[in-house]
Image: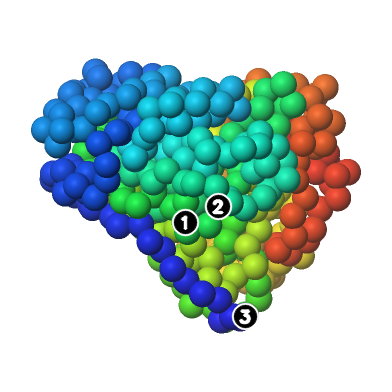
Amino acid sequence: MLGNFTYCNPTKLHFGENSLEMLKDELSHYGKNILLTYGGGSIKKTGLYDEIVKILKDCKKNITELPGVMPNPTVEKLYEGAKLARESEADLILAVGGGSVCDYSKAVSVSAYCNEDPWEKYYLKMEDVDNKIIPVGCVLTMVGTGSEMNGGAVITNHKAKLKIGHVFGENVYPKFAILNPKLTYTLPKYQMVAGFFDIMNHITEQYFSGTDDSTSDYLMEGLMKSLIHSSEIAVNDPENYEARSNIMWIATWALNTFVAMGKSTDWMVHMIGQSVGAYTDATHGMTLAAVALPYYRYILPYGTEKFKRFAINVWNVNPEGKNDEQIALEGLSAMESWMKKLGLVMNITDLGATPDMIDGIADGTFLLDGGYKQLTRDEVVEILKQCL
């Protein structure tokens, strides 16, 4: 393990098929005014909305609803939510949905009492929060982002063609999260498998950094092997509780900062994928799937030893009679086969991207260090061409 670090995660998790029963206890810690955020209304079809409203009313809470949170929350929706949260004097924002609803709720929590334009302050200037924060709680219905136990909040600005994530500090983390694997059963296959790859990519973007002997890498290898195993079961049997519960737990630990300890981390797949999303409004996990392999094949020569380890320890590649590069490439081929088996989108053309968008997508890609090679803008262009 390298470096010095401090680890703290203040989010309390309630996990299991009876976990919603804990909502009443959590609500007792907050005032009467609840801002209930959710997406397109699927929670009403499943009956979850009625269950939650009943709990809120039984707890004598005043409910203000904020529906219609889209898969890629927009800056306009952020302004709407911030205004409503402030006017309703919300004591708690209760996010019911997937990662986008959780992300959005955290963005609203820091924006409601912000005296500046929150888009400019938090997403362009990347400044810290210096105003009142409304606490957030989550009831998760989709897995992938890990947003239920981290400070991430991604917002899209279509006019500026930018999709930006701000990772806030522990003061913005959800105070509690309710994780019932059964609530994920009704998710359409497309969204389900997109979430599976989001989980995998969260792990690989932390794994493919550093060359030291790191305990975090061993933890990530175990998480990836468990994800591969359970995802293949879930694709064929979406209501397999064991598989879906494992995946839900993996998703949380993939991005609650735990496995990032002692790592430099490499988030370029997310940077490129999010810029693709700004142009196409495509499902987040699919944008990652469409750009991941071209990116990893591009940087493989700079981190061959780790890619070799990935092939052997995660994908069980037999190294006999092969050089390091052959082993490493075989590992990426094994990941590609797994991705195709799940039904993931493998290129950005299928997401709506066109060759004339390449320059704009590259311009909107934040260039980060931390991985085996820091890219230039021209290299991003070359990788994007391989993603078409």
Who comes first in sequence, dot 1 or dot 3? 3
Residues under labels 2 and 3: Cα distance?
Answer: 21 Å
Residues under labels 1 and 3: Cα distance?
Answer: 24 Å
Q: Amino acid at mark 1?
A: Asn
Q: Name the residue that disc number 2 marks.
A: 168
Q: Residue at x 27, y 45 (%)?
A: 30
Viewer-proximal residue among 110 and 74? 110
Mark 2 residue element: loop
Which quarter of the picture shows residue 289? Answer: top right
Viewer-proximal residue among 333 and 252? 252
Q: Are marks 1 and 2 in contact (CB under 8 Å)?
A: yes
Q: Residue at x 60, y 27 (%)?
A: 75
Q: Amino acid at mark 3?
A: Gly
Q: Nearer the viewer, mark 1 or mark 3?
A: 1
Viewer-proximal residue among 82 and 11? 82
Residues under labels 1 and 2: Cα distance?
Answer: 8 Å
Does residue 201 appear in this view?
no
Q: Residues within 10 Å of mark 1 (few under 14, many from 20)?
A: some
Q: Nearer the viewer, mark 1 or mark 2?
A: 1
Which quadrant of the rendered structure holds the C terminus?
top right
Of the numbered discs in the image, which one, if any, rests on residue 159? none
Q: Is residue 233 above or below residue 71?
A: below
Does residue 78 appear in this view?
yes
Q: Are marks 2 and 3 in contact (CB under 8 Å)?
A: no
Of the numbered discs in the image, which one, if any, rests on residue 3? 3
Q: Name the residue that disc number 1 marks.
A: 171
Taking the image as shown, residue 384 lies to the left or right of residue 71, namely right
Q: Amino acid at mark 2?
A: Phe
Taking the image as shown, residue 183 lies to the left or right of residue 229, namely left
**Horizontal and vertical percent position of residue 152:** 52, 48
